[in-house]
Amino acid sequence: MVVSELKKKADGLLAELEGLVSKAETASKGVTEEAEPLLGDKELKITEIEAAGAAVEEAGKEAEESAKAAQTFLAKETTTIKSVPNIQGETPHTLASDLAKLQARLNEAKSSTKSTSIKALGQKNIRVKRALAKEKYEKSIAAFKKFDADKDGKLSRQEIKKYAASTGFTVPIDTLDEIARVLQKEGSKGVEKEDFFRLQVMLGIARDAAQDAKRKEEREKKKEGDLCDDARPQTGLAQSIPCMPKTWRQIDFDLRLQSASVCAVPSNPDGRSGVDTSYYCRLPQTTEEVNACSLKVYMAWTGTDRYGRPLESSNMMPSKFTQMGVGNIASQFLTSSGGMIRKIDDRVSGSN
């Protein structure tokens, strides 16, 4: 093939490469255009942010495919274009320099696509977090707007009381005073929107304190009600046996004791009508009372065995206990009801 034909072929290859590079550049510009909403200053909703991000990703794929096509062609035809000699008597051709320029343009398009995609993705993540935070904030102050009846941008004492009541909490006066002292600015008629979160925290602390006090009071009442403080002394051999606490009598038992001497049953020694007999104790007298006298123990356990496998007694059959020495239990019970429970615990823990 003569030199002129080789040059003509190389010129055709350069023209084809020019088209491929131009297509890659156009695709790269498309990525930049799709990224503008994410890289600009305009505030976007989450749906708009997600849509813009998806558009950038799609444009980026198209730009990468265009650049890949141009790069493949360049790698295949570079030798053919560069190997064309100059024609004697004519001005030297510029095939090699033209090829280098096209390669530089392609590299620039690829670099622009990559950098724009990275920036757009970063801005997308930032904008999503910002939008979610704003959405969360708007939800958090929705209650503020609802209970700001006069729409003055502040919650007065009455409005704070109504807000707290909507959560099931009656605000004590001293708590309202403390809120006013801490959160209300001098000369202000209420708590402003910017301090609404701090108001919620202070109300939450006060509510928890009130609930703790209520639970403590209930525990104290229950503790007092569980003891037979007004039980009358038993007679005969049972004088040293204390009246069983109510909670013991209310529990169902799984372990039956063989001796009636460790069991006290309700009694009404004076025969008075309308008297709660649960506070008076005596020894069982009849066979039915003896058979009904039983000690029931509920046990539960949790943890792991020596191989680290989890153990839990929930919904499992009760443990099977070996025969217990009733005499020893009776002795412990006669000495101290607390001692009896410890004795049972010791035996149960060693035989389940």
Image (cartoon, grey):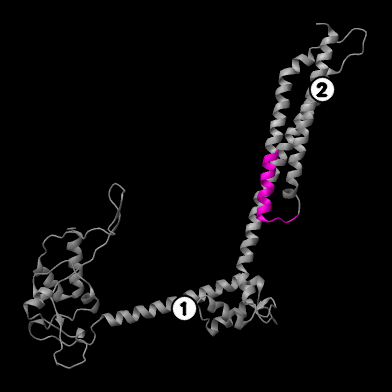
SS at badge 1: helix
| Nearer-the-camera pick, 347 or 50 | 50
Give the residue drawn at x 10%, y 73%: 291
Q: Residues within 10 Å of mark 1 (few under 14, many from 20)?
A: some
The residue where tag 1 is placed is 210
User: Which of 137/338 is in front?
Assistant: 137
Q: Quick check: can you spot residue 158?
A: yes
In this figure, which residue is indicated by the disc labeled 2? 15
Examine the residues drawn in magenta and state their main secondary structure. Answer: helix
Give the magenta range: 42-59
Up/down of 9 relative to 165, above or below: above
Q: Residues within 10 Å of mark 2 (few under 14, many from 20)?
A: few
Locate residue 331 relative to residue 134 in the image: left or right: left
The quarter of the displayed image where residue 121 is located? top right
Residue 234 is situated, as x and y percent measured from the top left of the image, at 13, 85
Q: Quadrant of residue 11?
A: top right
Place of residue 205 in the rendered image (x, y in percent of width and height, measured from the top left): 51, 73
